[in-house]
Image (cartoon, helix red, strand yellow):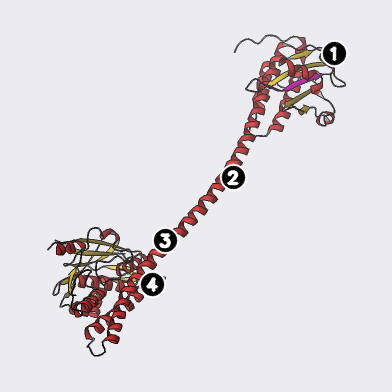
Amino acid sequence: MGEVPKENSTDSHLDINSANEPPPLHPAEKILATLTTVSYRAGELQSYLDSVCEALLELMGTGLSAITLYRYGTKKVLATKPESDCLSCGSMDIHGQLSTHVLNTNTILTVENALSNTQYGSPPEGFCSYMGVPLRSPGGEVVGTLCYFDKKARQFTDREEQTAELFAERIAIALDNYDLFQKLGEYSDSLELQVQERSEQLLKAHEELAQKEKLAALGEFASHITHEIRNPLTTIRLTLEYIKKNPERSPEKRLELGIGEVSRLERLLNELLLYAKPIEVNAGPLELSGFCQDFISTFDSIAKERRQTLKLLTDTPVTVMADRDKLTQVILNLVRNACEAADPEDTITLRLGKTDTVGRVSVHNFGNTIPADKLPIITEPFVSCRANGSGLGLAIVESLQKSQGGNVSFTSSVSDGTVVEIDLPLAPL
Amino acid sequence: MKARILLVEDDSALAQILTLHFEEGGHEVFHAPTLKLARQLIAE
């Protein structure tokens, strides 16, 4: 640090002399200490300006320090020390006096005795000398002044002017920061408002889209249902019309077809109900080997109708968390499909297995395969590989599986046949 | 006048009853489960 020059007599206000107190700070140290303690943080502008006025007063003497603002054509006293009612109420128009010169010239003005030298204006009542420093924004614009009035005539040293300039620079930065802070707040509010508006618009658009999708899905569903119902109805109508027109002829074959179509409609409605109604799951530990044996005992007739065989392969006990009734419906749909796809006298195999997390039932059959283009969509409603299939069986399977926290997957090829894997969470040990 | 009818249809009840209807009317009914097979039948 360079040598600090000795202060002249006009700097006596910067000295602190007291025999009982620690050695006084050097004036330069005091300025530095003051500048260090006065800081602008968190947008508290008024307290900052007050503290700057107070610090300036402490360094300069017992007069009056003031910060004035001139912006957008408005004159305002931002802070004074000591606080002055007449200043805050605006009765003392500082800008109309000495400060106006500082504002207009953008330079420091010091007046030793403004009472005798009135070319720059008159000081407030009770004061004699004046020092004014312009507050310059980062853009160079003069936005106000930092003023000091002393009660007696005095000169101001270069050091005092430099100190005042340092304070002025800090004040200007603080004012600029404050403006930025305010603008940022306004921008933030505006942005928040925009985000809120956009979010509402997005939500509305999303709801409209969801509604449209819902209607589209409903339309597609209705279209499928209509198709599924119209065909059997046409068959039944043709049968009845035939009987009416040809009472003497035997309608045996047609009646058989018509009754079959009535059964088909019944099945369709049952499946629709099963698919559409909410699923209530009562899952509990279910040992798969015993369950599958019971299943085969109960539903073996489905395979026997086509002289087919249901076979169970199991290596290890597997206990899953499942709803017995739901799983029965799942396996029933799969076994029924497998029997219809397989050739007469074929074997349909149920194989049990497990991984670290799931228990598995695989239903396997040879015979008609699922076309590759239908595999990815085979569980969608009304997708079927059979002429008289409703296309709801596998959709129901998937729905029931999901309701139990499980999964269903399909593979199908001529060489390996068709395998449907039913995964369910393993029961805790 | 006898017609030769090609049903591009699977073995559904509706297809069967239509077949009965046409055959009793003296028409000749052919079945083709797919369009591809239907084209082959027409070519023959």
Rounded to the nearest angstrom, the CA distance separating label 3 from label 1 is 87 Å
- Which badge, 3 or 1, comes first in the chain's sequence? 1
Rounded to the nearest angstrom, the CA distance separating label 2 from label 3 is 34 Å
- Which badge, 2 or 4, comes first in the chain's sequence? 2
Q: Nearer the viewer, mark 1 or mark 2?
A: 2
User: For the residue marked with disc 1, what is the amino acid?
Assistant: Thr
The residue positioned 63% from the left and 34% from the top of the image is: A183
Q: Which mark is residue A118?
A: 1
In the picture of the structure, the residue carrying the numbered disc 3 is: A216
Name the element at disc 1. Answer: loop
Name the element at disc 3. Answer: helix
For the view shown, which residue lies furthest in the bottom direction?
Answer: A248
**Does A116 sit left or right of A132 as displayed?**
right
**Does A52 sit left or right of A224 as displayed?**
right
**Does A304 sit left or right of A429 as displayed?**
left
Name the element at disc 2. Answer: helix
Looking at the image, residue A68 lies above or below residue A287? above
Residue A311, image x, y percentages = 18, 73
Rounded to the nearest angstrom, the CA distance separating label 2 from label 4 is 47 Å
Mark 3 touching mark 4, by CB under 8 A? Answer: no
In the picture of the structure, the residue carrying the numbered disc 4 is: A282
Rounded to the nearest angstrom, the CA distance separating label 1 from label 2 is 54 Å
User: For the residue marked with disc 3, what is the amino acid?
Assistant: Ala
Check if mark 4 and mark 1 are on a common chain.
yes
Which image quarter: residue A122?
A: top right
Pick the front one: A84 or A89: A89
Q: Which residues are magenta?
A: A140-156
Q: Residues within 10 Å of mark 1 (few under 14, many from 20)?
A: few
Mark 1 touching mark 2, by CB under 8 A? Answer: no
Q: Which mark is residue A193?
A: 2
